[in-house]
Image (cartoon, grey):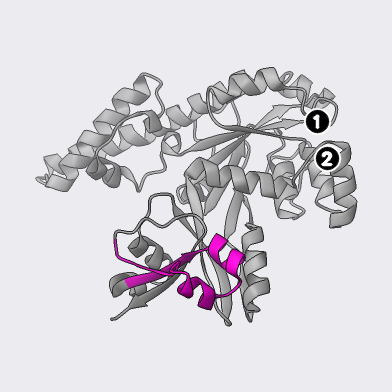
């Protein structure tokens, strides 16, 4: 999974990025970076920890999320090309976007960018996404019409034209593309473009220590726009530099139950509707990520394309079963071990072994 972190300049994006990745990317107050920071974090899942204790594998592999911290959006950019070519190429690959919104006061930032106004800032960013998408869509439509003039008018190109026209109409009405109903073929035809308003978004409200957890009114307002999570970014970046025992003491003082990375990882999974299944054995215990509703063949393909291509059956039992009964022999004896076919919908916490033949 790839999650892009974006927002206006100096909203604390990189502070949040450092808090979740434990990296030390530059957070200078005055400089604005040009290229994204990239970090990969483990999705710590206690189920993997318990399975490792049961199977004692040579390797334990947690799921991971790649976080990309993009340069800040500059509101006065008339062309709305607020990301570099490199950033636009990378943002195209993200599964979702986390928009960091400033909710802290700072004398320099207040004078330069104005006092914090979370709702206005969110609306401005969404407008920027829409305008950026409109520029891309209109340029693409021009190229499609040029192809028609050259005698190139395939069925695939016509489907794309329909999708682009639908997108332009919506964008001109200031609607995000994720609000529009596209057919499966239409979505496929425009998937290669960097349409920002088509991506799932969440909001990170970046508060300071003094007002953290005292912003329910604004959080309720934001939740009408998109899912929201509140961080005390600067405080949590400092926490990430401490060992677990020290960090826990300070977290309790701030009434924070989980680390920033765990909270954001969970929010990302919820946003995208992701679940985890597991493979286990003496060699390896590993978590795999799929979307809720995916079938056994899709899950097999996550492990290896050959497993999906030659899929026969999925041997499966649940995490709860192995925790309750401690070994696979007992699970078999109690009839909890199942053989499932291609159309089986994999459940969160399933343990799979794929039978295949290629």
Earlier residue among tags 2 and 1:
1
Residue at left offset 80%, top offset 51%:
240
Residue at left offset 44%, top offset 27%:
131
291 in magenta: no
Q: Residue beneath label 1, please?
A: 208
- Secondary structure beneath dot 2 equals helix
Left or right: where does residue 162 sit relative to residue 248? left
Residue at left offset 33%, top offset 34%:
137
| Residue 35 visible to an observer of this rendering | no
When the figure is inspected, residue 119 is found, relative to residue 164, above or below; the finding is: above
Spatial separation of the CA atoms under disc 2 and disc 1: 7 Å
- Secondary structure beneath dot 1 equals loop
- Is residue 256 or residue 94 the one in the foreground? 256
When the figure is inspected, residue 289 is found, relative to residue 358, above or below; the finding is: above
Q: Are marks 2 and 1 in contact (CB under 8 Å)?
A: yes
- Extent of the magenta region: 313-342
339 in magenta: yes
- Is residue 289 or residue 113 the one in the foreground? 289
Query: Residue 352 appears at what percent x and percent y?
Result: 45, 68
When the figure is inspected, residue 151 is found, relative to residue 214, above or below; the finding is: below
Query: Residue 52 appears at what percent x and percent y?
Result: 65, 72
* Mark sitting on residue 235: 2
């Amino acid at each position: 999974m790839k999650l892009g972190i974006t927002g206006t300049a100096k909203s604390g994006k990189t502070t949040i990025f450092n808090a979740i990745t434990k990296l030390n990317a530059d957070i200078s107050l005055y400089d604005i970076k040009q290229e994204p920071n990239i970090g990969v974090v483990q999705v710590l899942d206690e189920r993997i920890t318990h399975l490792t204790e049961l199977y004692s594998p040579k390797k334990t592999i947690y799921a991971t999320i790649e976080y990309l911290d993009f340069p800040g959006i500059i509101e006065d950019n008339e062309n709305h090309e607020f990301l570099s070519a490199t950033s636009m190429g990378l943002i195209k690959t993200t599964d979702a976007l986390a928009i960091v919104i400033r909710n802290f006061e700072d004398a320099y930032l207040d004078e330069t960018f104005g006092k914090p106004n979370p709702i206005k800032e969110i609306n401005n960013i969404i407008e920027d996404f829409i305008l950026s998408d409109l520029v891309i869509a209109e340029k693409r439509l021009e190229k499609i019409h040029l192809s028609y003039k050259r005698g190139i008018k395939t069925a695939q190109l016509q489907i794309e034209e329909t999708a682009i026209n639908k997108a332009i109409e919506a964008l001109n009405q200031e609607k995000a593309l994720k609000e529009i109903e596209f057919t499966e073929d239409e979505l496929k035809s425009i998937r290669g473009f960097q349409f920002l308003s088509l991506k799932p978004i969440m909001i990170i409200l970046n508060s300071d220590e003094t007002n953290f957890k005292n912003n329910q009114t604004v959080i309720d307002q934001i939740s009408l726009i998109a899912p929201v999570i509140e961080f005390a970014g600067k405080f949590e970046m400092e926490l990430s530099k401490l060992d677990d025992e020290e960090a826990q003491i300070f977290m309790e003082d701030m009434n924070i139950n989980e680390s920033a990375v765990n909270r954001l990882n969970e929010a990302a999974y919820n946003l995208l509707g992701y679940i985890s299944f597991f493979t286990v054995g003496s060699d390896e215990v590993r978590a795999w990520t799929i979307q809720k509703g995916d079938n056994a063949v899709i899950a097999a393909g996550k492990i290896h394309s050959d497993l999906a291509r030659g899929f026969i059956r999925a041997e499966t039992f649940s995490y709860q079963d192995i925790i309750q009964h401690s070994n696979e022999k007992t699970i078999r004896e109690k009839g909890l071990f199942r053989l499932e076919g291609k159309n089986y919908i994999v459940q969160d916490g399933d343990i799979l072994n794929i039978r295949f033949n290629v």
